[in-house]
Amino acid sequence: MHPALLGLITIIAGVGGCLGYFFLSNLVLDKVLFPASGPNAGRNINRANLVRPWLFLFPAIFALGLYLAYPVFETLRLSLTDRDAGGAFVGLDHYRQMAAEPKFWEAMRNNMMWLIVVPAASTAFGLMAAQLTDRIKWGNIAKSLIFMPMAISFVGASVIFKLVYDARPAGQEQIGVLNAVWLTFDGGLWSVLALRVVPAIVLLAFAALMLYALYAFLTPVFRPQASHSGSNWLATLGRIVGSVGVAWLAFLSARSLISLFTMSFPYGEPQTWLTVPFWNNFFLMAVLVWIQTGFAMVILSAALRGIPEETIEAAVIDGAGPFDIFFKIKVPQIMGTIVVVWTTITLVVLKVFDIVYAMTNGQWETQVLANYMFDKLFRANDWGVGSASAIVIMLLVSPILVWNVYNARKEMR
Amino acid sequence: MSSIAGSKSGLTWAVHLSVIGLVLLWLFPTVGLLISSFRTADQIYSSGWWKAAFTQQQNLVLRTKAPSEQGQEGDLFVISGNIFADNEANSDATIVAWGTSSRAIDDYVPGDTADMGEDGKLTVQANGDYRLENGTEFSGSRGERVFVTANTPPDFTLANYERVLFSGSGTDSMAKAFFNTLTVTIPATVIPIVIAAFAAYALAWMRFPGRALLIAAVVALLVVPLQLALIPLLRLHLEIGIGKGYLGVWLAHTGFGLPLAVYLLRNYMVGLPRDIIECAKVDGATDFQIFTRIVLPLSFPALASFAIFQFLWTWNDLLVAKVFLIDATGETTVMTNQIVELLGTRGGNWEILATAAFVSIAVPLIVFFAMQRYLVRGLLAGSVK
């Protein structure tokens, strides 16, 4: 049968089946099992109302259970058993085997870099775009153009950026934008400005931001306020962990600041960007940042509009400048939304597969966990290690999972 | 608010300029691919796409017609024609300089006559018309080499799209993959909506024990990476006989899309006015009637926003299709997979790659621009509290 016809039949059967299921099961419930008439009418109505929610929920619970909940446990089981040995329990053998592979640690290292860079850059660009476009006339057009990459598939974006990173041998006309720009650098004033001064400013700004965050994290720890009575040791712990991370980032940026001025650039030689170890990761990350910035912008811009005008007016009257207003009045008020955006992008990053698969397939030290797992499962056909790496992804996701559930429950109360 | 008198104009300009810069930066890569898809392979390789709108100077090595086509005028043997005759891409180029040896490719200007000794005299005009004459008969099997510096005006072609969409050639054709993608996408968008709508109604407006727990479970499942589901579900599909195919991929997309669908729809339905639903109840409507007649029509915006999400996600998906759909025959390939394969086999053929990528991007972009309002609303409902 032609697949399109099959598709049509599936739509009709699927939708019709669902509607039929809901309609008929309700009918059976009301007319046959617990008819709302006769001697026990009242009791029957109550019983029917006890059962009905489950009729409505059954297909969803079934699908969610089978397609998302069951696989979590099944994958866990697979990672602890050996398929070749007839499913015998092997404990942590697969994890040990995985930990012995340098490719796994490469994937872990890269994933950590992705986890820091992509959410930070997307949120920062998104916040900047949201703030800048908020009050100008053609802001909506600008927004929808920056938002547009959201509709483009990771694979499509990979093709787009492969053209940007394209390299041809020296002497030929470059057709990749990045190399065309690169070849205009010759060690003169313009190159020093673009390759050393501007990155240095960005790094300095980042380091300063991190130090500020460190300060913000640690102040409440050393000056506990009396009003915050009760058990907030969890918050204190979170703050200490956060400040260690932030301090590490500040140290890293300071270190790269030094290496920025000591390293020499290969001017005049076209670079095959995707094969330069370590740095090629950033060229892959740029693709995801390009896609996710629009998302961050849309949500943050809605949050910015939700800020009460009075707070800003008060700040203006008190003589605050535009930068003060932005960083001291607006950003603190939308901190909650920033965290939501950050975690949402973090989730996307943890699952990133298509970009790496399409652009480098993990070669040249660009492996990430999701692609490593795909490699193990479908190329090496090693279900044990593949499942183990899937569980590692799950473990990395689980703090966000707990946090989301915690917040959702808090809201419902 | 920063518009206090005095501080305005300078800052406003800076804002406008930086927004323009940001937008250009974000558009630049996509525009590059779009323009490349309208250029011939020769043009793509001879210059960057950002120069496509300008006249380009190219150095070409061309040949006159072979001696076998010579004619005789009096006692002169003549070969004449247009130097671009075999080079369609440059048919409207203008020659600015030419030469007869590789060491001096710009010896002559159009209209000049080059004396090549016993090889004869060659005259080349700006439009490529040439005349090669000699007192003795031309011999040899190939024509005279001519080195040409030509200005080619900008030129765009639809040939790439014709090739990718209608040529029917196995590897380049996206037509089949396009329809396969459509076949995957539409049921995978419609079915989860129906299932999720009922569940969302139950979670929003029905009272039963365990409701809070279920909502928490949905929120938890929202972040479960679908990577975990690949092996167990593929095994399940193979065991119960679905195997790799459309049915499997529809079911998988339905399962993976449900948490977001239930979450979005429930959040929206909870916000519907309680009065309407209670009035209907008092009037004797059953839950089924309330749902189909009142709640479903009122929830249209949320349904639309989820539909767009799911559509974009299933259309752009590669992983799920690779695992649950595409078998060894490759008959059921989808566009994303086709493009990845093109990247492998035709990594250098940018005219094919760019066009194929644009064919796959076009539909989501149309949906995006047509229904952006709902997409934004859905995003906000999903994240801002």
Image: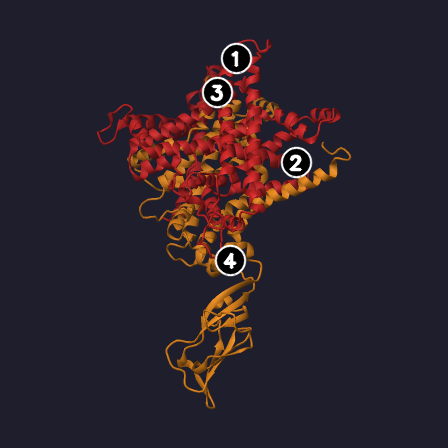
Chain colours: A red, B orange
Q: Chain of mark 4?
A: B
Q: Position of residue A276 (x, y in %)?
A: 42, 43
Q: Chain of mark 1?
A: A
Q: Nearer the viewer, residue A328 or B146?
A: B146
Q: Nearer the viewer, residue B360 or A326?
A: A326
Q: Residues within 10 Å of mark 1 (few under 14, many from 20)?
A: few
Residue type at tag 1 = Asn
Residue to which mark 3 is pinned: A241
Q: Quadrant of the N terminus of chain B?
A: top right
Kindly indicate whether the residue at mark 2 contacts the one at mark 1 (C-beta within 8 angstroms).
no
Kindly indicate whether the residue at mark 4 contacts the one at mark 3 (C-beta within 8 angstroms).
no
Q: Residues within 10 Å of mark 3 (few under 14, many from 20)?
A: few
Q: Position of residue B252 (x, y in %)?
A: 39, 35
Question: Of marks 1 and 2, which one's residue comes earlier in the chain?
Answer: 2
Question: Does dot 3 land on a helix, a strand or a loop?
Answer: helix
Residue type at tag 2 = Asp
Residue type at tag 3 = Val
